[in-house]
Image (tube, grey):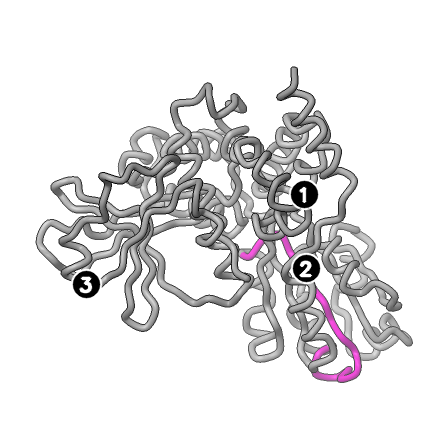
Amino acid sequence: MNLVITILKNIYICSMTMINRILQEKIKEKLFKKKAILILGPRQVGKTTLIYSILEGRDFLFLDGDDASVRQIFENINTFQLKQLIGPNKIIFIDEAQRIPEIGLSAKIITDQFKDVQLILSGSSALEINNKTQEALTGRKWEYNLYPICWQEFESTFGYLEAEKQLEHRLIFGMYPDVISGNHEEHKILKDLTNSYLYKDVLSLTGLRKPEILERLLEALALQIGSEVSYNELSNLLGIDKGTVIKYIDILEKAFIIFELRSFNRNQRNEIKNNRKIYFYDNGVRNIIINNLNSISQRNDKGALWENFLISERIKMQAYHQIYTKNYFWRTTIKQEIDWIEEVNGVIDAFEFKWKNKTTQKIPTVFKETYGASGKFIDRSNFREFICKE
């Protein structure tokens, strides 16, 4: 009973608190620098809330790409018509911009012809919006990815002790804003999120015609986090060709649902080459896909959940703080392995993840000696230094 009361209390506190995003000040600094600002990320991750907080106290024109009338306005629009649309506004915010035909050309005209106007675009599909804006906005944009709430944002808002109490809960339910503030409706919120975004938006945005294949693929990937993924095995499992598997995975990556980690090798003997692992940007999404929201104590996949959590949080940290690394895992044919490897300017760091570290465990000596790499274990006692940056 005390555990239930504690969880409900924590969730209530979350629902009453506005979480400040790391990108807020970084994007504010880019306003009126004669470039468009492009913010990408999955639906319901807080893009609109972030932009509204950045523009608080300012007047701006808001246009919703999900609105058919807005999309119609932009059909064959010219410079004069854009001037009429913009009017006296100095800031234009276009939400779900990937839904608007020829948004790239319109964005280019606004950025080039209206130098005193700040254009802000948000989109939930890197596939769609980049196809429409990449060439048109080359050299004319600041681009940011927004993900579910990161641990640093969570802890800085609720405090160390409150965050620590919720760690195991967050490993199960994830870090989406609505889930964090979802009171006792977390299961329903996650279910609605996956049904509306994964199985409707992704299909409509990409023109995929086999939702049952997408569902089975996601479930297969969710059951394999932390393990190497074979496209050939997925092809056989799903009864589709390997090319279709690769296409679907690419779409899921560009929709900010999963991401790929490739194997590290320098042609040394026994190193596994060209293999990959696939992780989810959010533990909650992964768990609802396999319909398992049991607590950590009732699970046999807590090691995989911990690994997915740490890696997705590290990806967020790298993106938000502009830490440019090459990321890999490493494994040999004789079963030596390392969960996470980073390479920056030839310097290599290796990390192993354990829910509870054992002092007898060591990073493989052969890897450290061959590549002059440092090695470290990340567990519950020191995970903050791996996923948070002061």
Q: What secondary structure is marked by label 3?
A: helix
| Vertical comparison of 49 with 74: above or below | above
What is the span of residues highlighted in magenta in the rendered image? 111-126
Total labels: the figure holds: 3
Q: Is residue 324 magenta?
A: no
Q: Nearer the viewer, residue 140 or 146?
A: 146
Q: Position of residue 344 (x, y in %)?
A: 34, 68
The amino acid type found where label 2 is placed reads Ser
Task: Give the mark toward the camera: 2 or 3.
Answer: 3
Q: Which residue is mark 1?
A: 177
Q: Earlier in the sequence, mark 2 or mark 3?
A: 2
Q: What secondary structure is marked by label 1?
A: helix
Q: Residue at x 52, y 55 (%)?
A: 388
The amino acid type found where label 3 is placed reads Tyr
Marks 2/3 in contact by CB < 8 Å: the verdict is no
Q: What secondary structure is marked by label 2?
A: strand
Q: Which residue is mark 2?
A: 122
Q: Residue furthest left?
A: 269
Q: Position of residue 49 (x, y in %)?
A: 75, 53
CA separation in Å, label 2 and label 3? 41 Å
Q: Nearer the viewer, residue 165 or 110?
A: 165
Q: Which residue is mark 3?
A: 371
Q: Nearer the viewer, residue 63 or 333?
A: 333
Q: Earlier in the sequence, mark 1 or mark 3?
A: 1
